Structures are given as C-alpha cells and as structure tokens.
C-alpha cells in the first residue's frame, strides 16, 4: 500500500512539474537574455572576436626572434670514394648534419609596431561589432515580443465581439418572434457572426505565427508550448520625449556603437597607411647560425702490409671538432619592386579617405535617424491618443445603436456597421499602443537607455 502511495506521489509531482514547464511564460527580459546567449549571429561575432585576439598574438610575435633547428641524416651505400685514401670502395657511409639559425628584426620601418597597433584596433572593432549585433538582436526581439502582445490582445477583442454577436443573435431571434424586428435582420446577424468567426481564426493564426517568429529568433527548437506574458511594463515610457532632439543626438554620439565602429575603422586605416609607408624604408635584420656535421664511415689504413679498419671518431668528438658559427646583420634597401610598395601606399591613402567619409556619413545618418525616431515616437504617441478618443466615441455610438436596435428603431445593417467601426477602433488602439511603445524604446535606445532595464 505504501509503495502505491509513493508511486502516486511521484506521478503527481512529475505531472505538476510538466504542467509548470509547459505553462511558463517568458518576459521581455528573459527573451532578450536568452537570445543574447543563443543567437547564431551573435555566436559568429564572438568567434570573430576570438580571431582578432589570435591576430593580436601574431602581431606580438613579430617582436620575438625566429629560431629554427635543422638536422639531416643520409646513407650512401655501394661504391663510394674513401675520404681518407681517395680509393673507391664498396662501403656504407652515414652523414649527419645539424644547425640552428636565429633571426630578429632590428629595424623594419616601424611596421611591427604599427601592426600591433592595428591588431589592437581590430580587436576593439570586433568587440564593437559584437555589441552592435547584440543591440540589433535586442531590438528585433523587443519588436517580435510586442507583436505577440498585440496579436494576443487583438485575439481577445475578436473573441469578445464574437461572444457579443452570439448573444445578440439569440436576442434578435427573440425580437423576431415578438415581431419587433424583421426576420431578415437575423440573417444579417448570422452573416456578421460568421465573419466574426473568420476574424477569430485569422487572429489565432496571426498570434501563432508571431509566437513562432519570436521562438525562431530566440533559437528555441521546441516551440510548441512557447508563450510570453500578457503585458509589459510601460511606466515612464514618455520620459525620453522631454529631451530635445539635439540632446538625444549628443547623447547618442557618446554611446552609439555605429559611430565607435566607424571611428575605429578610421584609426585602422591610418595604421594601414603607416604600415604601407614603412615598406619604403630600409630594414635591418640580425642573424646567428650554428652548424656541425658527423660522419659514420669506417676508415681503412695499412699497417705492416695488412689492411686494418678503424671506426670513425666518436659522435661528440666529431660534433665538437666540426662545429661552426656565423653571425651578423643584413641591410635591405628597397630600390624598385614593380611599384608594388608605392601602389600599396596609394591604396591605403584612398582607403583612409573612404574611412573619413564613412565616419562623416555615420554622423549625418545618426542625426537624421534620431530626428526621425523622435518624430516617429511623438507621432505614434499622438496617434495612440487619437485612437483612444476615437474608441471612446465609437463605444458611445455603439451603445446608442445597441439601444435603438433593441427597441426596433435601427436595422441590422446599421447596427452591424456601428459594431464593425467599434472593433476597428479597438484594434487601432492596440496597434498604435504597441507601435508607440516600440518607437519610444528605439528613441530611448539612442539616448543610451538599454532595451531591458535591470
């Protein structure tokens, strides 16, 4: 009996956890954070940053000396000349040679220093690119999240209207039976009810598609039960509108990643020009070399008319006796190289000018974008306020039409028209509401306020 009780308890707990997992609703903060951790584009940008770090290590390595060890071992089998007697003999001779070479740049037109500066700038630029990717993903997630909320509330509106029309159909049938309205009005109500059902299905499909789009943006594979909370914090959403566009532009210049990327690319172009000019200067390289050789052939001598062989000198003896060293410095002066260096300098100058123009264009684009975002945010807020006023008027008109229809003073066509205008007004309020929220968030983003507030 106890075993059955324990088993039942485990089943209940497991079932409860499954329901809880399926009923989880994601907040905007959770969606953004999850996307930042799992989005494929962000992962690719992180790998680009790792590559930039490796390039920086390579630039640091240019300051270190290069050390190379070489060794060679060979066998000569068959008829060979004896190196001691000069006679040809069938014998096996082994030779080993070894060496070490060290080279270091003493002066290279400051190219190594400029390469290191460029690598540092490239690493900074890759981090800015990663940050920009994260910002873009956060904005896309916020937009998709708000689209889900809009579709949720729009579905509620359509469902409520369907329920109202369903009740109205029953009421119309009673009025027809009482002789208050003609029978044709019931047919109009039924047609309008069928249209409401179509609108509900369309709203359900729109909600499903928006959830799917958000889940795919988050890289969620099992999205069948994916859902988000039914509301979003909108407190202090219009605080940024108290700022002037110029103030927002100046704030954006301090924080916008686009400008930082353009500025860093300009500095990289300057370093590329310095590197190209460095190739026009002489280079000085220091070198040191060590080498030795060892042979393993038996040496034949004649002693008392008898041929006697003795082995070659021991390994370490030959290693010491045959060693040699070399060191010095090499000066290289570029004289003519098919205009390659000169062309690289000219190409770097052009790229530098392009980077200057890109930075200037980025500043102009930022100013234009901020002014447009400010205007869009104010316009969206005003549109929402107008939509609310329209909804209040449509609600009163619908209530009046409902009263007139109930006593037979209005036909079904005019009544349905009033109801349709009310539904459209409700949908417009929802659309302008979430449109204003998103556009204000964009404006806050330019002002340096993150998409999610911790």
Image (cartoon, grey):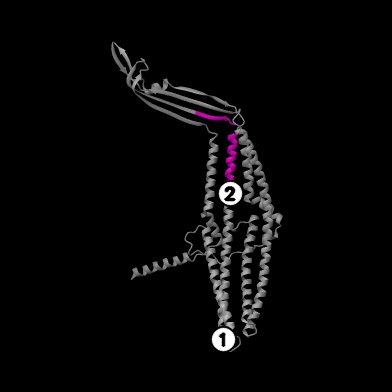
First in residue order: circle 2 vs circle 1: 2
Magenta stretch in the rendered image? 102-126
**Disc 2 crowd, CA 10 A, few/some/many (<14, 14-19, 20+):** many
Could you tell me which residue is drawn at 54 percent across and 74 percent down?
A: 197
Q: Say above or below: 54 vs 183.
A: above
- Residue 279 picture quarter: top right
Judge whether residue 106 is colored magenta: yes
Q: Which residue is mark 1?
A: 174
Could you tell me which residue is drawn at 55 percent across and 37 percent down?
A: 60
Dominant secondary-structure state across the stretch colored magenta: helix
Q: Say above or below: 252 vs 332.
A: below
Could you tell me which residue is drawn at 44 percent across and 22 percent down?
A: 323
Quadrant of image for the N terminus: bottom left
Judge whether residue 62 is colored magenta: no
Tell me, yes or no, whether the two marked residues, 2 and 1, touch with CB atoms within 8 Å.
no
Please give left or right for residue 40 compared with residue 347 in the image: left
Measure the C-alpha gap from mark 2 to mark 1: 68 Å
Residue 158: where, in percent of width, then height? 57, 72
Residue 46: where, in percent of width, then height? 53, 49
Q: Which residue is mark 2?
A: 129
Could you tell me which residue is drawn at 62 percent across and 44 percent down?
A: 265
Quadrant of image for the C terminus: bottom right
Please give left or right for residue 400 compared with residue 163 in the image: right
Instruction: Pick whichever, 415 or 383, lies toward us.
Output: 415
Q: Say above or below: 445 vs 153.
A: above
**Most extreme residue toward the top, as rendered?**
304
**Most extreme residue toward the front, as rendered?**
184
């Amino acid at each position: 009996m106890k075993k059955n009780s324990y088993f039942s308890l485990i089943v209940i707990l497991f079932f409860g956890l499954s329901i809880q997992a399926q009923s989880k609703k994601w907040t905007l903060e959770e969606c953004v954070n999850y996307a930042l951790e799992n989005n494929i584009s962000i992962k690719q940008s992180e790998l680009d940053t790792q590559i930039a770090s490796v390039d920086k290590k390579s630039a640091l390595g240019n300051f270190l000396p290069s050390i190379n060890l070489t060794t060679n071992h060979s066998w000569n089998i068959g008829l060979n000349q004896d190196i001691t007697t000069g006679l040809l003999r069938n014998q096996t001779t082994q030779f080993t040679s070894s060496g070490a070479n060290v080279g270091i740049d003493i002066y290279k037109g400051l190219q190594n220093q400029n390469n290191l500066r460029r690598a540092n700038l490239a690493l900074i630029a890759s981090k800015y690119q990663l940050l920009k990717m994260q910002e873009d993903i956060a904005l896309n997630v916020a937009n998709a999240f708000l689209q889900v909320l809009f579709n949720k509330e729009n579905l509620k509106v359509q469902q409520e209207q369907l329920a109202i029309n369903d009740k109205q159909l029953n009421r119309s049938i009673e009025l027809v039976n009482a002789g208050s309205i003609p029978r044709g009005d019931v047919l109009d109500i039924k047609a309008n009810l069928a249209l409401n059902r179509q609108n509900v299905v369309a709203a359900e499909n729109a909600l499903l598609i928006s959830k799917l789009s958000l889940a795919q943006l988050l890289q969620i594979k099992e999205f069948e039960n994916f859902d988000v909370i039914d509301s979003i914090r909108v407190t202090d959403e219009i605080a940024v509108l108290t700022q002037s566009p110029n103030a927002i532009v100046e704030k954006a210049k301090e924080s916008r990643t686009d400008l930082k990327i353009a500025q860093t690319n300009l500095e990289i172009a300057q370093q590329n020009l310095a590197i190209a000019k460095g190739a026009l200067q002489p280079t000085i390289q220091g070198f040191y070399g060590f080498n030795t050789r060892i042979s393993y052939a038996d040496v034949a001598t004649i002693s008392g008319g008898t041929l006697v062989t003795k082995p070659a000198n021991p390994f370490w003896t030959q290693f010491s006796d045959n060693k040699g060293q070399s060191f010095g410095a090499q000066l290289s002066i570029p004289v003519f190289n098919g205009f390659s260096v000169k062309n690289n300098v000219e190409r770097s100058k052009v790229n530098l000018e392009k980077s200057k123009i890109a930075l200037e264009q980025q500043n102009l684009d930022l100013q234009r974008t901020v002014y447009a975002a400010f205007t869009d945010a104010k316009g969206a807020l005003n549109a929402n306020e107008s939509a609310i006023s329209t909804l209040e008027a449509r609600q009163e008109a619908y209530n009046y039409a409902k009263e007139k229809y109930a006593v037979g003073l209005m036909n079904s066509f005019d009544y349905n028209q009033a109801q349709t205008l009310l539904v459209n007004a409700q949908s417009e309020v929802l659309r302008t509401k979430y449109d204003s929220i998103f556009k204000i968030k964009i404006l806050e983003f330019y002002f340096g306020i993150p998409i999610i507030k911790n």
